[in-house]
Image (cartoon, rainbow, N blue to C red):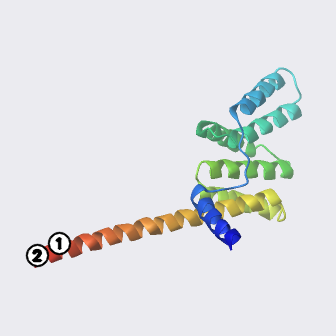
Amino acid sequence: MDAKIGKFFDSIGTFFTGSDNIPWCDSDIVHGFEREVAEAEKGSSDEDKSACLLRLSWALVHSRRPEDVQRGIAMLEGSLSSTSDPLQVREKMYLLAVGYYRSGDYPRSRGLVDRCLEIAPDWRQAINLKKSIEDHIKKDGVIGIGIAATAVGLVAGGLAAALSRRK
């Protein structure tokens, strides 16, 4: 019985805190990848530069800093059109979906993750991201309904109070 009660309170806590399985990235990791990109610019092959930029993009969209996430989104959007390898296109679309998820643009994130799942239907990371996106959309809907219901209750209570004073 205690275990069931514990699970109930954990599920309520998870609902309000928004638990997901997407990793976060600290700023020191971002700075490390920025240094790696700067070194690669000095004389590495185009393939090495591309790999360094992809790692930096990964770190940026997984960052806790919104400005890093936006920078990662911009980098990925800029490089996606010039990418021909289907595996890299899928990876960049997934990272874009993570970036939009982190920035709160859930519909755009869901569209991108759906495209990833069209390419690779069994891709576990994309499936988990889609579940997190749908959970956030549901949570936002429930909170919106709660706010609307509260507003309706306040208006009805105000009208009832005003009518009772007139009598």
Pinpoint residue 59: horizontal percent, then vertical percent. Answer: 74, 38
Q: Nearer the viewer, residue 156 or 90?
A: 156
State yes or no: discs 1 and 2 in contact (Cβ < 8 Å).
yes
Q: Residue furthest bottom?
A: 167
Q: Is residue 136 visible?
A: no
Location of residue 55 (image quadrant): top right
- Looking at the image, which is closer to me, 36 or 87? 36
At x 88%, y 35%, the residue is: 47
Q: In this rendering, is residue 139 above or below 20?
A: below
Residue 14, horizontal then vertical, whole percent? 63, 60
Q: In the image, is 61 to the left or to the right of 47?
A: left
Q: Could you tell me which secondary element the residue under label 1 belongs to?
A: helix
Amino acid type indicated by mark 1: Ala
Q: CA distance from mark 1 to mark 2?
A: 7 Å
The residue located at (88%, 25%) in the rendering is 44
In the current view of this chain or complex, which residue is farthest to the top?
42
Q: Amino acid at mark 2?
A: Arg
Read off the residue under disc 1.
162
The N terminus lies in quadrant = bottom right
Q: Which residue is mark 2?
A: 166
Q: Position of residue 72 (x, y in %)?
A: 68, 39
Residue 58, above or below 149: above
The image's mark for residue 54 is: none
How would you rate the neighbour count of disc 2 (Cα within 10 Å): few for under 14, some for 14-19, many for 20 or more?
A: few
Q: Whole-percent x and y of residue 84?
A: 83, 47
Q: Quadrant of the C terminus?
A: bottom left
Q: What is the secondary structure assignment of the residue under circle 2?
A: helix
